Image (spheres, grey):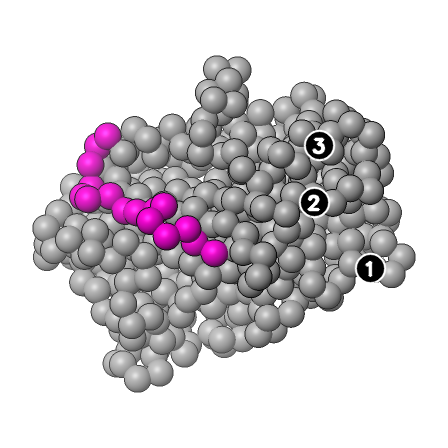
Protein backbone atom coordinates (compact mmCIF):
# COMPACT_ATOMS: atom_id res chain seq x y z
CA UNK A 1 0.00 0.00 0.00
CA UNK A 2 1.34 3.45 -0.74
CA UNK A 3 0.83 6.66 1.16
CA UNK A 4 -0.85 9.29 -0.99
CA UNK A 5 0.07 12.96 -1.07
CA UNK A 6 -3.34 13.91 0.29
CA UNK A 7 -2.70 11.71 3.33
CA UNK A 8 0.57 13.53 3.92
CA UNK A 9 -1.17 16.88 3.73
CA UNK A 10 -3.87 15.60 6.07
CA UNK A 11 -1.16 14.56 8.47
CA UNK A 12 0.38 18.00 8.46
CA UNK A 13 -3.00 19.35 9.46
CA UNK A 14 -3.61 16.68 12.09
CA UNK A 15 -3.50 18.25 15.52
CA UNK A 16 -2.91 14.94 17.29
CA UNK A 17 0.70 14.23 16.34
CA UNK A 18 2.34 17.59 17.03
CA UNK A 19 4.15 17.78 20.32
CA UNK A 20 4.05 21.16 22.00
CA UNK A 21 7.46 20.04 23.11
CA UNK A 22 9.02 19.57 19.77
CA UNK A 23 7.83 22.56 17.84
CA UNK A 24 9.52 25.34 19.81
CA UNK A 25 12.68 23.24 19.91
CA UNK A 26 12.53 22.87 16.17
CA UNK A 27 12.02 26.55 15.57
CA UNK A 28 15.16 27.46 17.49
CA UNK A 29 17.44 24.61 16.46
CA UNK A 30 16.82 23.92 12.76
CA UNK A 31 19.71 25.71 11.03
CA UNK A 32 23.34 24.80 11.47
CA UNK A 33 23.07 21.38 13.08
CA UNK A 34 25.35 18.73 11.61
CA UNK A 35 26.76 15.36 12.61
CA UNK A 36 25.83 11.71 12.32
CA UNK A 37 22.80 10.05 13.88
CA UNK A 38 22.25 6.30 13.71
CA UNK A 39 18.74 5.02 14.47
CA UNK A 40 18.26 1.36 15.38
CA UNK A 41 14.72 0.24 14.51
CA UNK A 42 12.42 1.70 11.85
CA UNK A 43 9.15 1.27 13.77
CA UNK A 44 6.85 3.89 15.27
CA UNK A 45 9.61 5.58 17.28
CA UNK A 46 12.68 5.16 15.08
CA UNK A 47 11.21 6.03 11.67
CA UNK A 48 9.56 9.17 13.09
CA UNK A 49 12.77 10.34 14.76
CA UNK A 50 14.75 9.77 11.55
CA UNK A 51 12.32 11.74 9.38
CA UNK A 52 11.96 14.65 11.81
CA UNK A 53 15.70 15.02 12.43
CA UNK A 54 16.21 15.33 8.68
CA UNK A 55 13.31 17.79 8.29
CA UNK A 56 14.06 19.95 11.31
CA UNK A 57 17.81 20.14 10.62
CA UNK A 58 17.09 21.20 7.03
CA UNK A 59 18.94 18.10 5.91
CA UNK A 60 22.05 19.08 7.90
CA UNK A 61 22.21 15.98 10.08
CA UNK A 62 23.18 12.70 8.42
CA UNK A 63 20.66 10.02 9.50
CA UNK A 64 20.98 6.26 8.96
CA UNK A 65 18.22 3.84 10.03
CA UNK A 66 19.08 0.17 10.60
CA UNK A 67 15.98 -2.01 10.15
CA UNK A 68 15.76 -5.66 9.01
CA UNK A 69 12.16 -5.53 7.76
CA UNK A 70 11.71 -4.50 4.09
CA UNK A 71 8.38 -2.81 4.91
CA UNK A 72 6.76 -1.14 7.89
CA UNK A 73 4.01 -3.42 9.25
CA UNK A 74 1.78 -1.75 11.81
CA UNK A 75 0.70 -3.39 15.06
CA UNK A 76 -2.13 -0.83 15.36
CA UNK A 77 -5.05 -2.24 13.27
CA UNK A 78 -3.35 -5.67 13.09
CA UNK A 79 -6.03 -7.12 15.38
CA UNK A 80 -8.48 -6.46 12.52
CA UNK A 81 -6.36 -8.75 10.33
CA UNK A 82 -6.74 -11.45 12.99
CA UNK A 83 -10.50 -10.85 13.08
CA UNK A 84 -10.62 -10.97 9.28
CA UNK A 85 -12.07 -7.55 8.44
CA UNK A 86 -8.65 -6.32 7.12
CA UNK A 87 -5.74 -7.92 5.28
CA UNK A 88 -2.05 -7.68 6.21
CA UNK A 89 -1.53 -5.45 3.14
CA UNK A 90 -3.89 -2.91 4.71
CA UNK A 91 -1.46 -2.38 7.62
CA UNK A 92 1.74 -2.45 5.55
CA UNK A 93 3.47 0.76 4.40
CA UNK A 94 6.55 1.24 2.20
CA UNK A 95 9.75 2.79 3.56
CA UNK A 96 10.49 4.33 0.14
CA UNK A 97 9.61 7.93 0.99
CA UNK A 98 12.10 8.19 3.86
CA UNK A 99 15.11 8.11 1.51
CA UNK A 100 13.30 9.67 -1.47
CA UNK A 101 11.75 12.67 0.23
CA UNK A 102 13.88 13.11 3.31
CA UNK A 103 17.33 11.76 2.51
CA UNK A 104 17.21 9.19 5.32
CA UNK A 105 19.64 6.34 4.63
CA UNK A 106 18.10 2.94 5.32
CA UNK A 107 20.21 -0.16 5.83
CA UNK A 108 18.29 -3.43 5.71
CA UNK A 109 20.30 -5.04 8.45
CA UNK A 110 20.25 -5.88 12.16
CA UNK A 111 22.34 -4.13 14.79
CA UNK A 112 24.21 -6.75 16.82
CA UNK A 113 26.24 -4.66 19.27
CA UNK A 114 26.94 -1.11 20.38
CA UNK A 115 30.23 0.29 21.66
CA UNK A 116 29.28 3.49 23.50
CA UNK A 117 32.96 4.34 24.20
CA UNK A 118 33.97 4.28 20.52
CA UNK A 119 30.44 5.43 19.49
CA UNK A 120 30.03 2.64 16.96
CA UNK A 121 27.34 0.12 16.06
CA UNK A 122 28.11 -3.32 14.58
CA UNK A 123 25.65 -4.85 12.13
CA UNK A 124 24.92 -8.49 11.30
CA UNK A 125 26.45 -7.93 7.83
CA UNK A 126 29.76 -7.02 9.49
CA UNK A 127 29.48 -3.33 8.66
CA UNK A 128 30.36 -0.84 11.42
CA UNK A 129 28.65 2.55 11.74
CA UNK A 130 30.02 5.54 13.65
CA UNK A 131 27.65 7.98 15.36
CA UNK A 132 27.59 11.26 17.25
CA UNK A 133 24.17 10.40 18.67
CA UNK A 134 22.56 6.96 18.67
CA UNK A 135 18.76 6.48 18.86
CA UNK A 136 17.43 3.08 19.92
CA UNK A 137 13.80 2.26 19.20
CA UNK A 138 13.95 -1.54 19.06
CA UNK A 139 10.51 -2.17 20.57
CA UNK A 140 10.13 -5.22 22.79
CA UNK A 141 11.56 -8.69 23.07
CA UNK A 142 9.90 -11.59 24.86
CA UNK A 143 11.10 -13.08 28.15
CA UNK A 144 10.93 -16.67 26.94
CA UNK A 145 12.58 -17.92 30.12
CA UNK A 146 9.27 -17.09 31.85
CA UNK A 147 7.47 -19.61 29.57
CA UNK A 148 10.13 -22.35 29.46
CA UNK A 149 8.37 -24.72 27.02
CA UNK A 150 8.15 -21.92 24.45
CA UNK A 151 11.88 -21.21 24.67
CA UNK A 152 12.61 -22.83 21.28
CA UNK A 153 11.79 -22.00 17.67
CA UNK A 154 9.66 -25.08 17.03
CA UNK A 155 7.27 -24.34 19.91
CA UNK A 156 7.15 -20.64 19.00
CA UNK A 157 5.97 -21.65 15.53
CA UNK A 158 2.99 -23.50 17.04
CA UNK A 159 1.89 -21.33 19.98
CA UNK A 160 1.85 -17.80 18.61
CA UNK A 161 2.04 -14.33 20.16
CA UNK A 162 1.31 -12.20 17.08
CA UNK A 163 2.50 -9.27 19.22
CA UNK A 164 4.91 -8.07 16.51
CA UNK A 165 2.82 -7.54 13.39
CA UNK A 166 3.80 -9.59 10.34
CA UNK A 167 4.05 -13.32 9.65
CA UNK A 168 2.63 -14.27 13.06
CA UNK A 169 -0.43 -12.05 12.52
CA UNK A 170 -1.30 -13.97 9.38
CA UNK A 171 -0.46 -17.33 11.00
CA UNK A 172 -2.78 -16.65 13.95
CA UNK A 173 -5.56 -15.69 11.55
CA UNK A 174 -4.99 -18.99 9.72
CA UNK A 175 -5.19 -20.96 12.98
CA UNK A 176 -8.58 -19.35 13.71
CA UNK A 177 -9.85 -20.08 10.21
CA UNK A 178 -8.76 -23.73 10.54
CA UNK A 179 -10.38 -24.13 13.98
CA UNK A 180 -13.69 -26.04 13.89
CA UNK A 181 -16.87 -24.33 15.11
CA UNK A 182 -17.33 -25.07 18.81
CA UNK A 183 -13.61 -24.59 19.52
CA UNK A 184 -11.94 -22.39 22.13
CA UNK A 185 -9.51 -19.52 21.49
CA UNK A 186 -7.61 -18.51 24.65
CA UNK A 187 -5.37 -15.48 25.03
CA UNK A 188 -2.91 -15.18 27.93
CA UNK A 189 -2.03 -11.61 28.99
CA UNK A 190 1.15 -10.89 31.00
CA UNK A 191 1.29 -8.78 34.14
CA UNK A 192 1.67 -5.08 33.13
CA UNK A 193 3.71 -3.30 31.90
CA UNK A 194 3.53 -4.74 28.38
CA UNK A 195 3.19 -3.35 24.84
CA UNK A 196 -0.24 -1.73 24.23
CA UNK A 197 -2.36 -2.10 27.40
CA UNK A 198 -5.76 -2.33 25.60
CA UNK A 199 -4.43 -4.44 22.69
CA UNK A 200 -5.18 -7.92 24.12
CA UNK A 201 -8.77 -6.98 24.97
CA UNK A 202 -9.26 -5.48 21.50
CA UNK A 203 -7.94 -8.75 20.06
CA UNK A 204 -10.46 -10.74 22.12
CA UNK A 205 -13.23 -8.54 20.66
CA UNK A 206 -11.98 -9.06 17.10
CA UNK A 207 -11.81 -12.84 17.49
CA UNK A 208 -15.31 -12.79 19.04
CA UNK A 209 -16.57 -10.64 16.14
CA UNK A 210 -15.30 -13.31 13.74
CA UNK A 211 -16.73 -16.22 15.77
CA UNK A 212 -20.12 -14.52 16.07
CA UNK A 213 -20.41 -14.46 12.26
CA UNK A 214 -18.50 -17.57 11.17
CA UNK A 215 -18.29 -19.97 14.15
CA UNK A 216 -21.07 -19.07 16.61
CA UNK A 217 -20.59 -22.11 18.87
CA UNK A 218 -16.97 -21.11 19.59
CA UNK A 219 -15.64 -19.35 22.70
CA UNK A 220 -13.04 -16.68 23.54
CA UNK A 221 -11.28 -17.06 26.91
CA UNK A 222 -9.27 -14.13 28.26
CA UNK A 223 -6.73 -15.38 30.79
CA UNK A 224 -5.38 -12.19 32.35
CA UNK A 225 -2.28 -12.13 34.57
CA UNK A 226 -3.58 -8.86 35.98
CA UNK A 227 -6.24 -8.49 38.67
CA UNK A 228 -8.53 -6.58 36.30
CA UNK A 229 -8.70 -5.24 32.73
CA UNK A 230 -5.75 -2.81 32.48
CA UNK A 231 -7.31 -0.26 30.08
CA UNK A 232 -10.86 0.91 29.17
CA UNK A 233 -12.19 -1.78 31.54
CA UNK A 234 -15.88 -0.80 31.76
CA UNK A 235 -16.10 -0.36 27.97
CA UNK A 236 -14.60 -3.76 27.18
CA UNK A 237 -16.65 -5.50 29.88
CA UNK A 238 -19.84 -3.97 28.48
CA UNK A 239 -18.95 -5.29 25.02
CA UNK A 240 -18.31 -8.79 26.37
CA UNK A 241 -21.59 -8.76 28.35
CA UNK A 242 -23.71 -7.43 25.47
CA UNK A 243 -22.22 -7.62 21.95
CA UNK A 244 -20.36 -10.87 22.72
CA UNK A 245 -22.63 -12.41 25.37
CA UNK A 246 -22.04 -16.16 25.59
CA UNK A 247 -18.86 -15.93 23.50
CA UNK A 248 -16.29 -14.06 25.65
CA UNK A 249 -15.33 -15.07 29.17
CA UNK A 250 -12.92 -12.94 31.21
CA UNK A 251 -10.79 -14.56 33.93
CA UNK A 252 -8.47 -12.27 35.98
CA UNK A 253 -5.42 -13.27 38.11
CA UNK A 254 -4.15 -15.91 35.67
CA UNK A 255 -0.37 -15.55 35.92
CA UNK A 256 1.11 -17.94 33.35
CA UNK A 257 3.96 -20.25 34.40
CA UNK A 258 4.31 -22.44 31.30
CA UNK A 259 2.42 -24.19 28.50
CA UNK A 260 2.10 -27.74 27.24
CA UNK A 261 2.72 -27.26 23.54
CA UNK A 262 1.37 -30.61 22.32
CA UNK A 263 -2.01 -30.23 24.04
CA UNK A 264 -2.14 -26.38 23.77
CA UNK A 265 -2.60 -26.12 27.53
CA UNK A 266 -1.77 -23.00 29.55
CA UNK A 267 -0.54 -23.48 33.15
CA UNK A 268 -0.85 -20.88 35.90
CA UNK A 269 0.64 -19.99 39.28
CA UNK A 270 -2.63 -20.54 41.16
CA UNK A 271 -5.53 -21.21 38.79
CA UNK A 272 -6.39 -24.47 37.02
CA UNK A 273 -4.78 -25.20 33.66
CA UNK A 274 -6.73 -24.32 30.50
CA UNK A 275 -6.68 -26.27 27.24
CA UNK A 276 -7.54 -24.42 24.03
CA UNK A 277 -7.90 -25.16 20.32
CA UNK A 278 -6.03 -21.95 19.49
CA UNK A 279 -3.71 -20.81 22.27
CA UNK A 280 -2.33 -17.26 21.94
CA UNK A 281 0.37 -16.47 24.49
CA UNK A 282 1.68 -12.94 25.10
CA UNK A 283 4.85 -13.61 27.14
CA UNK A 284 6.24 -11.03 29.59
CA UNK A 285 8.24 -8.40 27.73
CA UNK A 286 11.30 -6.20 28.02
CA UNK A 287 13.27 -3.72 25.89
CA UNK A 288 14.54 -5.10 22.57
CA UNK A 289 17.80 -7.05 23.01
CA UNK A 290 20.10 -4.44 21.46
CA UNK A 291 19.37 -2.15 24.44
CA UNK A 292 21.20 -4.65 26.62
CA UNK A 293 24.28 -4.55 24.42
CA UNK A 294 24.28 -0.74 24.60
CA UNK A 295 24.19 -0.96 28.42
CA UNK A 296 21.06 1.19 28.72
CA UNK A 297 18.76 -1.32 30.48
CA UNK A 298 18.44 0.17 33.97
CA UNK A 299 14.95 -0.62 35.35
CA UNK A 300 14.20 -4.11 36.75
CA UNK A 301 16.58 -5.64 34.23
CA UNK A 302 13.85 -4.92 31.64
CA UNK A 303 13.43 -1.30 30.59
CA UNK A 304 15.58 1.80 29.93
CA UNK A 305 15.38 4.91 32.13
CA UNK A 306 15.65 8.13 30.13
CA UNK A 307 15.89 11.87 30.74
CA UNK A 308 12.43 12.96 29.53
CA UNK A 309 13.78 16.27 28.14
CA UNK A 310 15.97 14.48 25.58
CA UNK A 311 15.17 10.76 25.84
CA UNK A 312 18.90 10.24 26.43
CA UNK A 313 19.78 7.26 28.61
CA UNK A 314 20.34 8.21 32.25
CA UNK A 315 23.37 5.91 32.19
CA UNK A 316 25.05 6.01 28.78
CA UNK A 317 25.88 9.34 27.13
CA UNK A 318 24.88 10.03 23.52
CA UNK A 319 22.43 7.10 23.42
CA UNK A 320 18.71 7.95 23.28
CA UNK A 321 15.88 5.43 23.69
CA UNK A 322 12.31 5.73 22.44
CA UNK A 323 9.04 3.87 22.45
CA UNK A 324 8.19 0.61 24.16
CA UNK A 325 11.78 0.06 25.34
CA UNK A 326 11.74 2.87 27.92
CA UNK A 327 10.79 2.77 31.57
CA UNK A 328 7.51 4.66 31.28
CA UNK A 329 6.54 7.72 33.29
CA UNK A 330 3.34 7.62 35.39
CA UNK A 331 0.24 6.98 33.29
CA UNK A 332 2.20 6.69 30.03
CA UNK A 333 1.19 3.70 27.89
CA UNK A 334 3.54 1.72 25.67
CA UNK A 335 1.84 2.78 22.43
CA UNK A 336 2.67 3.73 18.86
CA UNK A 337 1.23 7.20 19.40
CA UNK A 338 3.43 7.68 22.45
CA UNK A 339 6.52 6.41 20.57
CA UNK A 340 5.76 9.00 17.86
CA UNK A 341 5.70 11.71 20.54
CA UNK A 342 8.91 10.49 22.20
CA UNK A 343 10.51 10.61 18.74
CA UNK A 344 9.63 14.26 18.17
CA UNK A 345 10.87 15.44 21.57
CA UNK A 346 14.05 13.44 20.98
CA UNK A 347 14.48 14.71 17.40
CA UNK A 348 14.29 18.35 18.51
CA UNK A 349 16.61 17.69 21.47
CA UNK A 350 19.20 15.86 19.34
CA UNK A 351 19.29 18.73 16.86
CA UNK A 352 19.65 21.20 19.73
CA UNK A 353 22.46 19.19 21.34
CA UNK A 354 24.29 18.76 18.02
CA UNK A 355 24.24 22.53 17.52
CA UNK A 356 25.31 23.35 21.08
CA UNK A 357 21.92 24.57 22.28
CA UNK A 358 19.76 23.63 25.26
CA UNK A 359 16.79 21.35 24.60
CA UNK A 360 13.27 22.64 25.14
CA UNK A 361 12.70 22.61 28.94
CA UNK A 362 8.88 22.22 28.82
CA UNK A 363 7.81 19.28 26.65
CA UNK A 364 4.15 18.30 26.43
CA UNK A 365 3.07 15.01 24.80
CA UNK A 366 -0.30 13.52 23.95
CA UNK A 367 -1.64 10.02 23.41
CA UNK A 368 -4.78 8.52 21.90
CA UNK A 369 -5.43 4.79 21.70
CA UNK A 370 -8.43 3.55 19.73
CA UNK A 371 -9.74 0.01 20.22
CA UNK A 372 -12.06 -1.75 17.79
CA UNK A 373 -14.98 -3.48 19.52
CA UNK A 374 -16.50 -4.65 16.21
CA UNK A 375 -15.15 -4.11 12.69
CA UNK A 376 -16.32 -0.47 12.84
CA UNK A 377 -17.37 0.46 16.39
CA UNK A 378 -14.57 1.92 18.44
CA UNK A 379 -13.68 3.26 21.90
CA UNK A 380 -10.75 5.53 22.75
CA UNK A 381 -8.65 6.62 25.70
CA UNK A 382 -6.54 9.78 25.53
CA UNK A 383 -4.15 11.64 27.81
CA UNK A 384 -1.75 14.60 27.90
CA UNK A 385 1.65 14.43 29.62
CA UNK A 386 3.61 17.50 30.73
CA UNK A 387 7.18 17.81 32.02
CA UNK A 388 7.42 18.57 35.73
CA UNK A 389 10.65 20.44 36.49
CA UNK A 390 10.77 19.54 40.18
CA UNK A 391 10.03 15.84 39.71
CA UNK A 392 12.04 15.67 36.45
CA UNK A 393 9.47 13.46 34.78
CA UNK A 394 6.39 13.65 32.55
CA UNK A 395 3.12 13.71 34.48
CA UNK A 396 -0.45 13.31 33.21
CA UNK A 397 -2.30 16.65 33.05
CA UNK A 398 -5.36 16.40 35.29
CA UNK A 399 -8.64 16.67 33.38
CA UNK A 400 -6.95 16.71 29.96
CA UNK A 401 -7.74 13.14 28.94
CA UNK A 402 -10.72 10.83 28.95
CA UNK A 403 -12.46 7.82 27.46
CA UNK A 404 -15.40 7.30 25.10
CA UNK A 405 -18.86 7.11 26.67
CA UNK A 406 -19.62 3.97 24.60
CA UNK A 407 -18.49 2.17 21.47
CA UNK A 408 -19.59 4.03 18.34
CA UNK A 409 -19.10 4.15 14.58
CA UNK A 410 -18.07 7.81 14.44
CA UNK A 411 -14.92 6.93 16.35
CA UNK A 412 -14.43 4.02 13.98
CA UNK A 413 -13.94 6.62 11.25
CA UNK A 414 -11.57 8.57 13.51
CA UNK A 415 -9.57 5.43 14.25
CA UNK A 416 -9.02 4.64 10.56
CA UNK A 417 -8.02 8.29 9.96
CA UNK A 418 -5.67 8.14 12.95
CA UNK A 419 -3.89 5.19 11.35
CA UNK A 420 -3.59 6.83 7.92
CA UNK A 421 -2.35 10.04 9.50
CA UNK A 422 0.24 8.51 11.80
CA UNK A 423 1.59 6.33 8.96
CA UNK A 424 1.90 9.46 6.81
CA UNK A 425 3.44 11.43 9.69
CA UNK A 426 6.00 8.66 10.23
CA UNK A 427 6.79 7.58 6.68
CA UNK A 428 5.52 9.96 3.97
C1 LIG B 1 -1.95 -5.97 18.48
C2 LIG B 1 -1.42 -4.60 18.79
C3 LIG B 1 -2.23 -3.49 18.62
C4 LIG B 1 -1.74 -2.21 18.90
N1 LIG B 1 -2.56 -1.14 18.72
C5 LIG B 1 -2.11 0.11 18.96
C6 LIG B 1 -2.94 1.25 18.72
O1 LIG B 1 -4.10 1.12 18.31
N2 LIG B 1 -2.42 2.48 18.97
C7 LIG B 1 -1.15 2.66 19.41
O2 LIG B 1 -0.72 3.81 19.58
N3 LIG B 1 -0.33 1.59 19.65
C8 LIG B 1 -0.77 0.34 19.45
N4 LIG B 1 0.06 -0.75 19.65
C9 LIG B 1 1.39 -0.54 20.26
C10 LIG B 1 2.46 -0.14 19.22
O3 LIG B 1 2.53 -1.08 18.18
C11 LIG B 1 3.84 -0.04 19.89
O4 LIG B 1 3.72 0.68 21.09
C12 LIG B 1 4.83 0.65 18.95
O5 LIG B 1 5.05 -0.17 17.84
C13 LIG B 1 6.13 0.98 19.67
O6 LIG B 1 7.05 1.58 18.79
P1 LIG B 1 8.61 1.21 18.88
O7 LIG B 1 9.31 2.09 17.92
O8 LIG B 1 9.02 1.19 20.30
O9 LIG B 1 8.66 -0.31 18.41
P2 LIG B 1 8.28 -0.94 16.99
O10 LIG B 1 7.26 -0.13 16.30
O11 LIG B 1 8.00 -2.38 17.26
O12 LIG B 1 9.62 -0.85 16.16
C14 LIG B 1 10.77 -1.56 16.54
C15 LIG B 1 11.58 -1.84 15.27
O13 LIG B 1 12.92 -2.12 15.64
C16 LIG B 1 13.42 -3.13 14.81
N5 LIG B 1 14.55 -3.73 15.52
C17 LIG B 1 14.54 -4.39 16.71
N6 LIG B 1 15.79 -4.77 17.04
C18 LIG B 1 16.60 -4.35 16.05
C19 LIG B 1 18.00 -4.44 15.81
N7 LIG B 1 18.81 -5.07 16.68
N8 LIG B 1 18.51 -3.89 14.69
C20 LIG B 1 17.69 -3.25 13.81
N9 LIG B 1 16.37 -3.13 13.99
C21 LIG B 1 15.82 -3.67 15.09
C22 LIG B 1 12.22 -4.05 14.57
O14 LIG B 1 12.38 -4.80 13.38
C23 LIG B 1 11.07 -3.05 14.49
O15 LIG B 1 10.77 -2.66 13.18
C24 LIG B 1 -0.41 -2.04 19.38
C25 LIG B 1 0.41 -3.16 19.54
C26 LIG B 1 -0.07 -4.43 19.26
C27 LIG B 1 0.82 -5.62 19.43
* Rendered position, 303 above or below 5: below
The residue beneath circle 1 is 116
Above or below, 180 against 92 in this view is below
Question: Quadrant location of the C terminus?
Answer: top right
Tell me the crowding category of disc 1: few under 14, some 14 to 19, or many 20 or more residues within 10 angstroms, Cα based.
some
- Camera-nearest residue between 347 and 385: 385
Seen at 78% across and 53% down, the residue is 318
Of labels 1 and 2, earlier in sequence is 1
Q: Is residue 105 left or right of residue 41?
A: right
Q: Is residue 330 magenta?
A: no
Q: Which residue is mark 3?
A: 28
- The residue tagged with tag 2: helix, strand or loop? loop
Query: What residue is shown with label 2?
Result: 359
Q: Which residues are magenta?
A: 395-410
The label nearer to you, 1 versus 3, is 3
Of circles 1 and 2, the one toward us is 2
What whole-number distance in Å separates the C-alpha atoms at marks 1 and 3?
28 Å
Amino acid sequence: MSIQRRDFLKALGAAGFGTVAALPGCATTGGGAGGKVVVIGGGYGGATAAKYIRMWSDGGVDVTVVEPSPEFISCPLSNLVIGGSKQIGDVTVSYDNLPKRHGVKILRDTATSVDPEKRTVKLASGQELAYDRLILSPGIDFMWDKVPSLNNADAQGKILHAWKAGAQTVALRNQLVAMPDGGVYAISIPVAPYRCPPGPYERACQVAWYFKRAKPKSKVLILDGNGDVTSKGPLFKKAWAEEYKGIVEYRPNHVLTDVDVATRTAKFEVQDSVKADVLNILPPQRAGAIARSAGVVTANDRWCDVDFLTFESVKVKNVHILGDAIQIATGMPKSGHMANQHAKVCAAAVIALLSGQAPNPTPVLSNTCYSFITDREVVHVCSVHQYDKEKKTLLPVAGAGGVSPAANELEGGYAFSWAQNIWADTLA
